Image: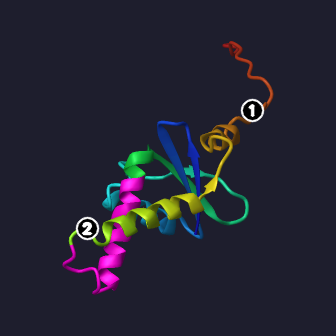
């Protein structure tokens, strides 16, 4: 699975590329369940290499909060050393979330343009002529 990001300053677009649509949507639901996004579905980007790509929009603050939550639960579920310690694991989870976001490839273009461009083909099929039929 591959993650990319595009930022407009206020909004953040996350692109998920996976082997199947179900796998990508499962990851979106993971972000959604940890309040990293309000998106209920992915917008599809077509690819010719057999992989599915989709994107969703969120805010940078919301997505960082979601990544922190994901990593917090991951740490608490997999380690006994942090349980019961107030604030002990939260700074580590925040740092892990920032590192994860930094690992996403930065896009220099708006990925939504790929969708617009892929549907901008014009086809000509000839002409249509309407004539009044003979009644004789």
**Residue under pointer 2:** 87
Q: Residue at left 30%, top 81%?
A: 77
Q: Residue at left 68%, top 66%?
A: 50
Q: Residue at left 33%, top 70%?
A: 72
Q: Quadrant of residue 68?
A: bottom left
Classified by dominant secondary structure, the portion drawn in magenta counts as helix
- Please give the range of residues in magenta: 64-85
The residues bearing labels 1 and 2 have C-alpha atoms spaced at a distance of 58 Å
Give neighbour class at mark 2: few <14, some 14-19, many 20+ (Cα, 10 Å).
few
Horizontal side of residue 131 vs 61, given as left or right? right
Horizontal side of residue 92 vs 113, given as left or right? left
Locate residue 37, reporting x and y percent: 38, 51
Locate residue 97, reporting x and y percent: 44, 63
Locate residue 82, reporting x and y percent: 28, 80
Locate residue 128, reporting x and y percent: 74, 22
Q: Is residue 55 visible?
A: yes
Image quadrant holding the C terminus, namely top right
Callout 1 secondary element:
loop
- Nearer-the-camera pick, 107 or 28: 107
Callout 2 secondary element:
loop
Horizontal side of residue 136 vs 70, given as left or right? right
First reached walking from the N terminus: tag 1 or tag 2: 2
Is residue 59 shown in magenta? no
Q: Quadrant of residue 7?
A: top right
**Residue under pointer 1:** 122
- Nearer-the-camera pick, 87 or 54: 87
Location of residue 131 with respect to 64 vertically, above or below: above
Q: Are marks 1 and 2 in contact (CB under 8 Å)?
A: no
Q: Nearer the viewer, mark 1 or mark 2?
A: 2
Horizontal side of residue 38 vs 128, given as left or right? left
The disc at residue 64 is none
């Amino acid at each position: 699975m591959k993650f990319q990001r595009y930022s407009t300053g206020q909004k953040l677009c996350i692109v998920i590329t996976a082997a199947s649509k179900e796998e990508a949507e499962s990851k979106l639901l993971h972000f959604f369940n940890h309040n990293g996004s309000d998106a209920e579905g992915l917008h599809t980007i077509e690819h010719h290499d057999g992989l599915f790509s989709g994107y969703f929009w969120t805010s940078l603050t919301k997505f960082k909060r979601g990544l922190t939550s994901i990593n917090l639960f991951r740490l608490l579920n997999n380690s006994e050393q942090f349980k019961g310690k107030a604030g002990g694991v939260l700074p580590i989870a925040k740092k892990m979330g920032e590192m994860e976001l930094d690992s996403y490839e930065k896009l220099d273009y708006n990925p939504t343009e790929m969708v617009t461009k892929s549907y901008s083909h014009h086809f000509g099929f000839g002409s249509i002529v309407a004539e009044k039929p003979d009644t004789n």
